[in-house]
Image (cartoon, rainbow, N blue to C red):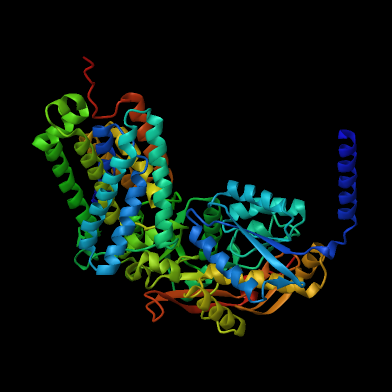
Amino acid sequence: MSTFVIGLSISMLLFLLAAGLTLIFGMLRIINFAHGALYMFGAYLAYQVSASSGSFWLALLVAPLGMALIGALTERWLLRPIYSMPHEFQLLITFGMILVIEEMVHVFWGLNGRNIATPVALAGGVEWLGTTFAKYRLFVIVLGAAMIVLLLLGIERSRLGLIVRACSVNPTMAASLGVKVNTVRTAVFAAGAALAGLAGAVAGPMLPIQLQMGTTIILDCFIVVILGGLGNIRGAVLGALLIGMTRAYGQQWLPEWIDILTYSVLIATLLLRPQGLFSKKERLA
Amino acid sequence: MKKLFCSGMMAATLVCSALTAAMPVNAQDVFRIAGIVPLSGAFGVVGENMRRGVTIAIEERQSRVLGKPIEISWDDTETSSQVAVQKTTRALSRDVQTVFGEASSGSTLAMMKLTEQRKVPQIITLSADDRITGADKTRYAFRTSNTVAMENRMIGEFAKRQGSKKMYAIVSDYQVGRDMWAALKLDFESKGIQVIGVDLTPVGTKDYAVLLDKAMKSGADSLMLLVVGGDVVTSLKQGADVGLPQKMKVMGTMLMDETLGQSVGPAGSLGVNSTLRYHYSQNSPRNKRFVEAYKAKYKELPSQYAGEAYDGMSWWLDVVEGTGVWDKEKWVDAFHGSVRKDSVEGEKTMRACDNQASQVGLFGLAQPGTEGPVVMKVTEQFTAAELFKPCT
């Protein structure tokens, strides 16, 4: 039971980060390599707010908003001019962003690792069935589940989601119907960046806040996104659960093999269903 | 005209070559040191601290040795052995008198092959792999800091003194980790401490919760955490919320100090026991001078990495100064068997048999303190005789 709960918490943290990545790809067709750097920046911003104000909850609010602002500026000034250019330009721009963000963080916060204290209400653990469960992990599970519901409802059931999907599928048609496509694109990129910031703030009390934190976790996020199918939120949920549980149960029974197990899941999926577990075949005409 | 120009150039080249060859060896105008350390990547903070320690060692002698100015260049290895080798090769082509570094044992071992080929002294103040002054030792590489073997002896002895009966271990799965654990397991068993479980986990593991849960349910009274880099912070941070330091006696090598305490936070740090390479509280006149100079320059207390780097470099430069000659071979000869009466940690001796400094060993406990939220208190001190086997 304890392994399942821990696996669930790993999955939800992965989902929070992968959701932003898949949202941006699904709606804008941009593979945002700087997503890990935004996650790291979000964690540092959350640390700063938490250290200055003493409130984790304020940090949890400010970090996504700060990253949303950076995301919006990035989309407007860096990505919009290159939508019509080959994909290599997106790769170069987002990769360049990693270097810029890392250097900014280095200049502002230095090389020393930072820590966000777990909020008092979520500190410590609860005993259940002979196991101590960290309250903070239970919070991560609840937050992750809430974000899943919010994203699915927002994209699949709301009018806003309909507009976003219309802009993704046929931007010219959407524009001719009066939709401000550029504004929608900026908002989508900002939302993806906000999710990265939220994941950074949530990770703060659990993981080391350091310059490399983005690069170490982004690989798992790409695996989640590839497993679920690029641009698919439902797929990201399943991918996150698959990787989170593989890691948790792998640590329980075969800790030395954990990386091999994780990558085997990826290879098996790519061999059996290269479009991802949840991708639907696209109608071409 | 062209012919005349070519002949002139050739003559000038010949004269220059002849002058260079005839120049006496002690006519060098600068003592060059190549600092090859990680200044970015996972060990960036370690390298930065090493750089600070060396800077104090150079500044305290007005940046001069043998009457010549000291010129130090810093190269960032980016926490990569491959880059370390590239940067060392480039540094050696600049005709340096000393190479300083690296932090990781793998990089240090690779660099040692190059410094041996070029016969350039190398000062090592952090890497602990036994091969550095064991199977792969060279005439030119000197280690002034701890070895894996001495840290193992400290851990074994510490666990025994603390009354540990049952031990669980979580070990980073890399060569040094595996070697350390193999030796430690034998040591624990020889001391009557039962090893009831071990988990090897990849370096860079992002979640330790399952492993910590296994350890806490195992019935062990002590946990040996043999993890490195960011994994130290990850494991201890995640242990905080399930009360790990309260439920088990947590111990390890380089597992905790004031710098790591900042990253982990008090909840995961307080109560953790760790070997210490150096501690600013050491009561020696040189250490007091060093701590004062360090605080004045950097506005904080020196870390273990800074302390060890200072100690190694200041010892080496004093030895060079003592020879009075500009000759690398003479400096190396003088360092073999050199005794440092007033190192920051008391007396150290550079063993001529393996270029390893024999020295005391420290063990500390993380406690709340006035200088910061987490302060290490030196709880045990081991003598050099307890930690080192005689030279063979």
Q: Residue B213 appears in which quarter of the rendering?
A: bottom left
Task: Depth check: give the residue in front, B386 or B177.
Answer: B177
In the rendered view, would you say B371 is above or below A183? below
Task: Please state if B279 lies on the left or on the right of A282 as rendered.
Answer: right
Can residue A186 be seen? yes
Residue at figure coordinates x 39%, y 74% from the top left: B374
Residue at figure coordinates x 43%, y 59% from the top left: A107
Can residue B388 be seen? no
Q: Residue A132 appears in which quarter of the rendering?
A: bottom left
Task: Depth check: give the residue in front, A73 or A234.
Answer: A73
| Number of residue marks | 0
Task: Depth check: give the residue in front, A77 or A31.
Answer: A77
User: Residue B286: where, in percent of width, then height?
Assistant: 61, 81
In the rendered view, would you say A187 is above or below B230? above
Task: Please state if A101 lies on the left or on the right of B360 as rendered.
Answer: left
In the rendered view, would you say B323 is above or below A13? below
Task: Please state if A203 lies on the left or on the right of B382 as rendered.
Answer: left
- In the picture, the quarter occupied by the C terminus of chain A is top left
Residue at figure coordinates x 51%, y 62% from the top left: B46
User: Residue B309: where, in percent of width, then height?
Assistant: 60, 68
* Farthest front residue in view: B1
User: Residue A113: where, in percent of width, then height?
Assistant: 41, 62
